[in-house]
DNA sequence: ATAGGGTTAG
């Protein structure tokens, strides 16, 4: 009897032990749902089972559920407390982990080390050191190493080295040395890293790997290769580091050579090789390895799915996702991102509904997908349902609302944010500028500086575009100075915006100067300069710049020809204009769009060829836009052709019934030819529709019902720099 | 078997 009870108890212990092993394995692979299922089905559990499950939740970002388990757990041991602290630490919950540390009944060296790395990860080095100092009895070798690593990772090399020398020599090991070295190599300090490496008393494979990776990050491929070849006992990480270096340089044959030569391979090595092929878009090669490899984990599946998404084979990606033997958020999110990028929001929604363990990245992908495709109603709905809002998403929502012209909603989120980064400001600023609130764009540029946020190329592009539209040369010049001061003068996008600003403010020579000083140029740069010469009336100069551009091997696009044709129009170069209009599609393969027709109508109309331009509009193969009819109306006004004018005006009013300037133009045509009764009728029609001259409106003015005068008072330079 | 420090894959 007693023997059989003992036997049963022994069996029970064996079962718990083996199920705990399985639980650990599932937690490590991120197969959280299977872990939950197993945990719930276990006939008996011990503290290890609970601890495992707490850790499993926390490592998969589900820290709230981990805590619920911790609170429900029947008898907690020291490891339970440490596990929960580690869980908070992994999820950047600094407050919660330090609270738990204060509450726990007893602490050991694990607890101390956990807190030190938690503080260090959050840059709170003084708090880490205070704790380290206050508990000398708990300072283990590992604890010293954690503190050293904390200093080194935060760039405090002197403190790291000082503590390294201070620690008892007997417990100083290769990890201690490597902790300092990693600080150097991972922050690109290779000169100091090399010096430290040479002075190191003890080196192991990790030290050499750090050097190789450091050189690779710094783009010093030769040194990386030399150090790799000289590594005395390379481990798998050494090979994978070097292999990755080849992949990143697009050198897949070399990478494969290393992979084939490797003395042993693990999952990480296989995954690295697959990732290399995926990055170089060799999806077939990647898939071949995927089929050959002995085992796969969530990283393997995610990499492959991502690969198919990159080459736009969404069906293949989905096949893989459905074939996965377990669920994983990262893999699901890779697929979701594929749908979102292809604007297949219905499929994205279907997949999203199926994902049980949604993380931040997953929510972000879905909501930003809706925001980018202009479906703000859907975005808002999901946004409200999201448990934890993050800054990325707040910024996305601001940008989404702004792009839809919903500045009120955008500001509602923006104003409530406690912390804003450059992207938050850029979202608001570009929204203001895209919606034509140019004064407010500049005002918020100033506010951003006052809050201590550094503008980037995007902020400058919006600011300069606003200066171009106002136009305000004075503000534009100030932005230019600030741009130089901040060190963005070599930025391509900022340079393009500067050219546009100077050109539209009538300073074409300054625009040219910016162009000549630019480190590199693209098609937009050339287009900006050509259009700049055109709008300033230098038609021939614009055309010579166009020839210069062709000589440099740039292929003109639609925008280029708008510049060229308007240059001909502004310069009265009718024959050249007709020649370019003809050659743009025939020679350069650029199909004319409505804007080009508007230029041609303008060109012909200016020189009195009104009937000819009317015929051009009548025969054009695409729908004439308001711009085209407007140009025709303008031409009629110059040459007094009231019949065509009336026709053009009628078409114009069909497209833009509420635009006051159209009525003004038509009434001017009638006034020019002395038909006063018709002038009166147009004016009456305007009044009937409740139109008046458009106010120079401003978003802030509309909200505050007052006129701001910040332009003359505020200065971009000063206060902050 | 569950908690801590330095290198490699999504």
Image: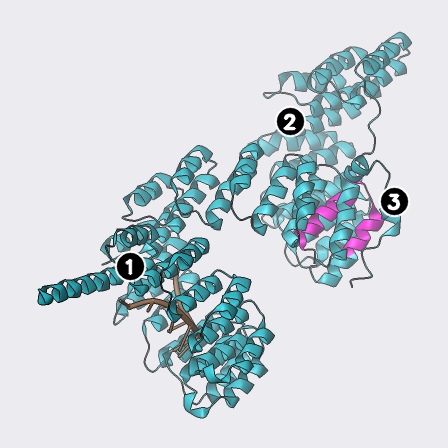
> Which element is circle 3 on?
loop
In the rendered image, the vertical position of residue A706 relative to residue A480, given as above or below: above
Which of pointers 3 and 1 lies earlier in the amino acid sequence?
1
The location of residue B9, given as percent across then percent down, is 39, 61
Is A289 drawn above or below residue A200 in the view shown?
above
Q: Examine the rendered structure and indicate whether residue A598 appears above or below residue A266.
A: above
The residue identified by callout 1 is A23
Label 3 belongs to which residue? A709
Q: Is residue A476 magenta?
A: yes
- Pointers 1 and 2 in contact (CB under 8 A)? no
3 vs 1, front mark: 1
Q: Position of residue A553 (x, y in %)?
A: 58, 48
- Residue located 48% across and 49% down the image: A361
Q: Chain of mark 2?
A: A
Colour scheme: by chain
Circle 2 packing at 10 Å, graded few (<14), some (14-19), many (20+), is some
Q: Which residues are magenta?
A: A456-480
Question: From this viewpoint, is residue A311 visible?
Answer: no
């Amino acid at each position: 009897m007693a023997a059989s009870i003992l036997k049963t108890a022994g069996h029970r212990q064996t079962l718990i032990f083996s199920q705990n092993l399985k639980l650990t394995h599932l937690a490590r692979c991120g197969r959280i749902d299977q872990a939950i299922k197993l945990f719930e089905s276990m006939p008996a559990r011990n503290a290890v089972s609970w601890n495992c499950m707490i850790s499993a939740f926390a490592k998969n970002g589900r820290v709230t559920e981990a805590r619920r388990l911790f609170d429900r757990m029947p008898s907690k041991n020291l490891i339970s407390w440490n596990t929960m602290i580690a869980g908070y630490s992994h999820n950047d919950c600094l407050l919660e982990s330090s609270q738990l540390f204060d509450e726990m009944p007893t602490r050991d060296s694990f607890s101390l080390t956990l807190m030190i790395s938690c503080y260090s990860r959050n840059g709170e080095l003084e708090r880490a050191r205070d704790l380290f100092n206050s508990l000398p009895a708990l300072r283990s070798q590992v604890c010293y190493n954690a503190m050293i690593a904390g200093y080194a990772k935060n760039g405090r090399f002197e403190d790291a080295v000082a503590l390294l020398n201070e620690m008892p020599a007997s417990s100083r090991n290769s990890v201690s040395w490597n902790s300092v070295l990693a600080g150097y190599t991972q922050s690109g300090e290779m000169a100091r890293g090399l010096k430290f490496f040479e002075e190191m008393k003890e080196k192991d494979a990790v030290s050499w790997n750090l050097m190789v990776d450091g050189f690779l990050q710094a783009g010093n491929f030769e040194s990386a290769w030399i150090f790799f070849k000289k590594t005395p006992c390379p481990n798998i990480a050494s090979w994978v580091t070097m292999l990755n270096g080849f992949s990143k340089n697009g050198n897949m044959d070399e990478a494969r050579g290393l992979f084939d030569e490797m003395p042993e391979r693990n999952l990480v090595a296989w995954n690295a090789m697959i990732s290399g092929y995926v990055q170089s878009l060799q999806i077939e090669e990647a898939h071949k390895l995927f089929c050959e490899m002995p085992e796969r984990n969530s990283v393997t599946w995610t990499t492959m799915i991502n690969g198919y998404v990159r080459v736009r084979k969404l069906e293949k990606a989905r096949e893989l996702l459905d074939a996965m033997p377990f669920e994983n958020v990262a893999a699901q999110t890779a697929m979701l991102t594929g749908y979102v990028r292809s604007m297949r929001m219905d499929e994205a929604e279907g997949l999203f509904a199926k994902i049980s363990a949604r993380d931040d990245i997953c929510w972000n992908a879905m909501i930003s997908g809706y925001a980018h495709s202009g479906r703000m109603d859907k975005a808002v709905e999901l946004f409200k349902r999201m448990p934890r809002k993050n800054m990325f998403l707040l910024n996305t929502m601001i940008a989404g609302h702004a792009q839809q012209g919903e500045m009120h909603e955008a500001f509602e989120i923006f104003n409530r944010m406690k912390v804003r980064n450059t992207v938050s400001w850029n979202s608001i600023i570009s929204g203001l500028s895209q919606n034509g609130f140019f004064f407010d764009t500049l005002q918020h540029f100033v506010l951003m500086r006052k809050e201590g946020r550094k503008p980037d190329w995007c902020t400058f592009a919006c600011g300069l575009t606003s200066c171009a539209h106002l136009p305000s040369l004075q503000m534009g010049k100030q932005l230019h100075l600030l741009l130089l001061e901040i060190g963005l003068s070599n930025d391509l996008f900022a340079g393009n915006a500067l050219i546009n600003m100077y050109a539209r403010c009538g300073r074409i020579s300054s625009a040219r100067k910016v162009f000549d000083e630019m480190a590199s140029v693209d098609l937009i740069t050339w287009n900006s300069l050509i259009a700049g010469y055109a709008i300033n009336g230098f038609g021939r100069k614009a055309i010579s710049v166009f020839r210069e551009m062709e000589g440099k091997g740039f292929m003109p696009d639609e925008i280029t020809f708008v510049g060229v044709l308007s240059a001909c129009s502004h310069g009265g170069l009718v024959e050249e204009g007709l020649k370019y209009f003809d050659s743009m599609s025939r020679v350069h393969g650029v199909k004319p769009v409505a804007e080009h027709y508007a230029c041609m109508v303008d060109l012909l109309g200016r020189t009195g060829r009104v009937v000819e331009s009317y015929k051009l509009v009548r025969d054009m193969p695409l729908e004439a836009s308001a711009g085209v009819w407007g140009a025709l109306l303008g031409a009629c006004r110059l040459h007094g052709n009231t019949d065509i004018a009336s026709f053009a005006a009628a078409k114009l009013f069909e497209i833009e019934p509420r635009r006051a300037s159209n009525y003004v133009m038509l009434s001017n045509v009638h006034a020019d030819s002395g038909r006063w009764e018709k002038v009166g009728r147009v004016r009456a029609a305007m009044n009937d529709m409740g139109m008046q001259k458009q106010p120079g409106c401003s978003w802030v003015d509309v909200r505050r019902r007052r006129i701001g005068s910040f332009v003359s008072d505020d200065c971009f330079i000063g206060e902050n720099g």
